[in-house]
Image (tube, rainbow, N blue to C red):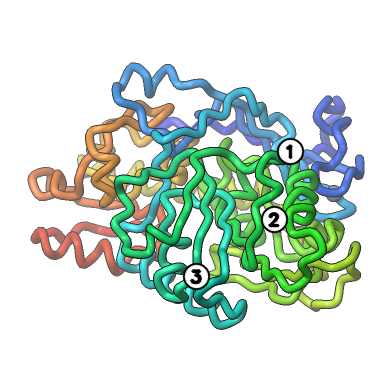
Amino acid sequence: MPKFRQRWSEPLATTAHPRSATALPCQACGSTALESFYELNGVPAHSCLLLPTRAQALAFPRGDLELVFCHDCGFIGNARFDIGLNRYSAAYEETQAFSPRFLKFLDEICHDQIRKSGLSPGMTALEIGCGKGEFLTRLCELSGCNGIGLDPGYHPERNQSIAAERMTFIRDLYGPRYAHLQAEYVSCRHTLEHIAPVQEFMRLVRETIGSRRHVSVFFELPDMERVLQTGVFWDVYYEHCTYFTRGSLARLFRAAGFDVIGLYKAYDDQYLMIEAKPAPGPTPSRLPQEDDLASTAALVRRFSKEVELRLQELAAAAQRWRRSGQKVAIWGSGSKSVSLMSSVDLGDTLQAIVDINPHKHGKFLAGSGREIQSPDALTALRPDAVIIMNSIYTEEIRHELASRGLKPELLPL
Ligand SMILES: [Zn+2]
């Protein structure tokens, strides 16, 4: 039998002993009406940091997860998140930009954002947490605007764009020392979920904009509603210390002095998009999709059961592969696979972890200590089954496998 470490908790309501974490107020609204609903101990503190040796990957610091739900604003956060374990640096390798499917999506959102914000030559776009700068660069290329990007993980040598001369990259985390940066457009993609003091962060963003009410604001982050509905526990990991649904995200923006003008899901409903304009003060809810507090509370109560079902399905697949002596590979070495391997032990059946990002090849995954290989390694291995860590890439991966003469069973997650 494959080993499964079942370490999530029952909802707090059925637990006799109170948890210290629930004494902490909500990071989004300050309420103390928090309910603990999911627990996972000893998970790798980072999942996108690549380690040069197996020993370093195995010894990588671990932290604990305890998801709490705020009954007043719907915010979900890891009550046991320890910022001291954060190590964001140039070794952080999060980019998905080696995937044609992802690049197409990036182009679509750039065109959409330029149309909505009116970005044009002479204007400036600021991106907080710009990663490798793909979005900001494409925005500058397509609109002719100037760009300012902030991220400790930016690699200037990888940016070959002709728009680079109109762009300034600051290899640092955003903070009060950058409150003077002025821009007509402020974006923040896949960053808010890495920030614990979200209320403080949003206030700072609002302060940076000041009285310039014409500024357009766009945030993109994972959607927690889908994770709760489907029990996809591999989308919950230590690096993500905060989780939002449409309602809780809108409430955070409104309380910080923004009016929410757009609120929707994208990328097969995996991502949450919010478009906002600065307002003189807090704004009242006015979009129907913000009204999700009761439905989120119901999903939170069911989450552990959904996770159990996903674990049982994976256990059944792993048992079947093991019995028939089949070889399995995982395609995708990002946070999802680190998270999957923290909960599921596929043992000897798992023969390879591959990724299309060449910057990851030959490096090791925190926690499991597995080496990341090029998809070319599968040509010799000839796996019987391939676990696809993000189902949105299924057709792209099926094509990549076929081009190597491979037709394994696919298990898209
Ligand atoms: Zn709250």
Residue at 37%, 43% in the rendered image: 155
**In the depicted structure, whether residue 170 falls above or below residue 391:** above
Identify the element where label 3 is drawn. Answer: loop
* Residue at image mark 2: 244
Left or right of 69 in this view: 54: left
For disc 1, the neighbor class at 10 Å (few under 14, some 14 to 19, many from 20) is some
**If you read the primary sequence from the N terminus, does the residue marked by circle 1 or circle 3 appear first?**
1
Front of the two marks 1 and 3: 3
Identify the element where label 2 is drawn. Answer: loop
Instruction: Give the residue type at disc 1.
Output: Glu
Between the residue at mark 3 and the residue at mark 2, the CA separation in whole angstroms equals 30 Å
State the image coordinates of residue 20 (x, y, percent, origin top left): 83, 25
The numbered mark at residue 10 is: 1
Residue lying farthest to the front in this orientation? 122
Say which quadrant the N terminus sits in. top left
The numbered mark at residue 145 is: 3
Instruction: Give the residue type at disc 3.
Output: Cys
